[in-house]
Image (spheres, rainbow, N blue to C red):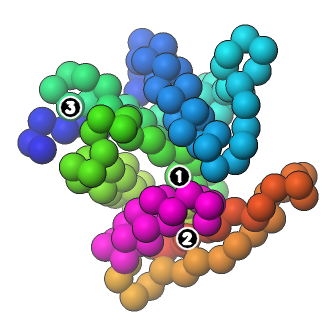
Amino acid sequence: MSDLSVRPATAQDRPTVERLWLMFRHDLSEHAGVLPGPDGTFRSERVDSAFTQAGWAPYLFLRADRPVGFAFVRALDGPARVLNSFFVVRGARREGIGARAVRDVLLRHPGPWEIAFQYANAPAVHFWRSVATQLAPDAWSEETRPVPDRPDLAPDVWISFVC
């Protein structure tokens, strides 16, 4: 996988990231039962925040100059960084790209990290526990937290560690 590159996403990358975002939200809809809006798109406030808000950083993953995923980091100006969104396209999964990309992103911002996922998404449960174990073998924790202002949703699972 020497042809994988992870780099900060630029304003010129935003249309590409927006298309990847639709795939990401489509994948998550399986676990959350969320449907697209009448125009066929999903909510995208996080994309806007990643590209415009202080304390956020968008990243783009490329393999042989083809986009294969993205990550949004937030709270860079807070006590713990948060991996807000992380996605690898299905055609590039199970090749170690996700593990390499997330490691690259997290190590660009050393310090405390928090990553949320849902128990209903079994591949995510396995992936994030594996990431935490690799980066902080005996020094990570996992807890459930209610989704703010959404008592109708199952709680999020949060993994915390320092890298």
Label 3 belongs to which residue? 63
For this orientation, the residue located farthest to the bottom is 138
- Quote the CA–CA distance across marks 2 and 3: 28 Å
The answer to whether residue 101 is left or right of residue 114 is: left
Can you give x and y, in whole percent of width and height, for residue 36 in the image? 71, 25
**Residue 79, relative to residue 144: is it above or below?**
above
Foreground mark, 3 or 1, reads: 3
Q: Residue type at mark 2?
A: Ile
Can you give x and y, in whole percent of width and height, for residue 17 in the image? 47, 24
Question: What stretch of residues is rendered in magenta?
Answer: 117-135
| Circle 2 Cα neighbour tier, 10 Å, few/some/many (<14 / 14–19 / ≥20) | many
Can you give x and y, in whole percent of width and height, for residue 5 in the image? 22, 36
Looking at the picture, tell me which residue is in the foreground, 38 or 87. Answer: 38
Query: Residue at image x 51%, y 62%?
Result: 122
Answer with mark 2 or mark 3, whichever residue precedes in sequence.
3
* Residue 163 seen in the current view: no
Query: Residue at image x 15%, y 26%?
Result: 64
Give the SS element for disc 2.
strand
Can you give x and y, in whole percent of width and height, for residue 42 in the image? 68, 26
Quarter of the image holding residue 46?
A: top right
Query: Residue at image x 21%, y 49%?
Result: 95
Label 2 belongs to which residue? 159
> Is 132 in the magenta?
yes
